[in-house]
Image (spheres, helix red, strand yellow):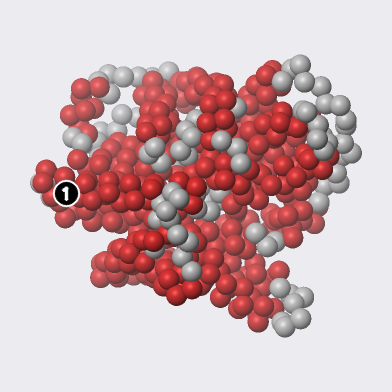
Amino acid sequence: MSESSRLSAVAQPLQGRDRFLVALCLLAVMGLELLARLSGSQAIQYAAYAAVGATVLAAVRDLGLREKYLLTLCMVLTLLTLWLHPDPPAVLLAGLDQAAFLMAFLLLLNLLHEAASTSPAVARCGEYLTRQQPGRRYYALNFGAAIMAVLFNVGVVSFLVPLIQRGIEAGTPGDARNPIRERRQISAMLRGFAWCVIWSPTAIAPLALMELIPGTNRQVWIAIGFCIFVGLLVLGALEDRFVFRAYRPQTKPATPLFPRQAAFRFLLACSWLFGMSAVVMLLSGETVVFGLMVSCPVMLVGWLLVQNLGAPEGAWAATAGRLRVIAFSNLGGAAPVAITLACSGYVGRVAAALIPAAAWAEVLGLDAMPDFVFLALLPVAVASLSLLALSPIMMAVFFGSLVGSLPVLPADPTLIALAISCGWALSMTFSPFATVVLLISRVGEIPPRRLTWQWNLGFTALAAVALVPVFALLTGGR
């Protein structure tokens, strides 16, 4: 999942003992963060912070320019906090709390990717999406990528991009129109993945913002977000058809049979995950975030057991072997991305604490600004600042912390959180520095600026404009 190998030629992949040590640190982060949230113990929480620091030290040789830049920014903000803020310990501990949470949550979600990557049902669903007829392909790839991202997360990109490229070359080898096909199909997939973050129950953006903005209603958020997603799905399909209106497919591929059994198993896996999360949430009295965090490792073991039912050595033995590979080999490779996410959370939280939110709100006239104008401007601000090579999650945490610290919120908290997550979605088709864009670039060898500014700039602008009447409707024009 890491893009650090692309960003730095000096980063050396960890091997052997070093990778094992990094894996132990990452396992400690996950375990301690879960225990801290379950027990409420401050001592265990401090141990989780220490595990995050140990991860950075253990993985230092595997870090690229982006991670080193973010770590430097963390140190600068720490010094500024010690110098300028009246209560530095509270601010720094809040930053560490956000860093540990995001690192642990990413790693736990990545466990689902490990299971999904070896699932025959997921593979058959992916092949079905990429073999649709031209008239339905945009909808299939857009919506399919969004649905698969619920369990696959960003791994859906590394899974679908090669399938798309291989399918194009196999269907029309050497055709001069293949670059057009590649652009349309990968753009459809990227847009679906980008905008699923405003409704997906497992998207990191909403779950991070729920921790920062009090009073958000996740169920309402998901419902509104899904409606916006469907509207932008149709808008994107119309934009795609208009841009390529002169293009006429030369061949009409056969319609593939719908993989009913594979789709049923995938939906069963989703139901299993969310059912477990709901049970954990009800029994523990905690949030849906905690329910998902607890459910992910249980889901991993159960899903692997199902996959290994026919293994010659037995399901339990095969699953145990696979878990050892995941824990002590694959997990270490996620260290750069996990550190990037932790730094983003720390920077966003600490930077927001250094800004006098109430004074800025007064200067900007937020009290007098109509709610829908404020909500429509938030996504544009988040997406625009992502061009400074700051990750979208950093901007989401920053704006979430900043708005959440205001004595009086300038709009409904659920709509504020939704608007910030819309900015996250916009940045993924607009910023060449977004993680998903860099991942597609690495997997599919497509330059980031071509993928964003050349292929998707028009759609991004249309989406930003379309949000204005949406927020006006949701706020009653206030």
Residue drawn at the location 38% of the way across and 39% of the way down: 390
Furthest-front residue in this view: 10
Residue 91 in picture, x, y percent from top left: 20, 50
Q: Quadrant of the C terminus?
A: top left
Q: Is residue 123 visible?
A: yes
Residue 76 in picture, x, y percent from top left: 21, 46
Residue drawn at the location 49% of the way across and 24% of the way down: 464
Q: Nearer the viewer, residue 116 or 421?
A: 116
Q: Answer above or below: position of 172 versus 312.
A: above
Residue drawn at the location 62% of the way across and 77% of the way down: 321
Disc 1 on helix, strand or loop? helix
Q: Nearer the viewer, residue 113 or 439?
A: 439
Residue of label 1:
79
Q: Answer above or below: position of 279 versus 167.
A: below
Is 320 on the left or on the right of 267, as rendered?
Answer: left
Residue 476 in picture, x, y percent from top left: 44, 21
Q: Nearer the viewer, residue 84 or 206?
A: 84
Q: Give the residue type that dot 1 points to.
A: Leu
Is 112 on the left or on the right of 9, as rendered?
Answer: right
Is the residue marked by circle 1 packed among few (<14), some (14-19), or many (20+) residues within 10 Å? few
Is 254 on the left or on the right of 121, as rendered?
Answer: right
Residue 293 in picture, x, y percent from top left: 47, 61
Residue drawn at the location 58% of the way across and 67% of the way down: 300
Determine the image quadrant of residue 287. bottom left
The number of numbered badges drawn on the structure is 1
Is 271 on the left or on the right of 23, as rendered?
Answer: right
Q: Nearer the viewer, residue 198 or 72?
A: 72
Q: Is residue 129 visible?
A: no
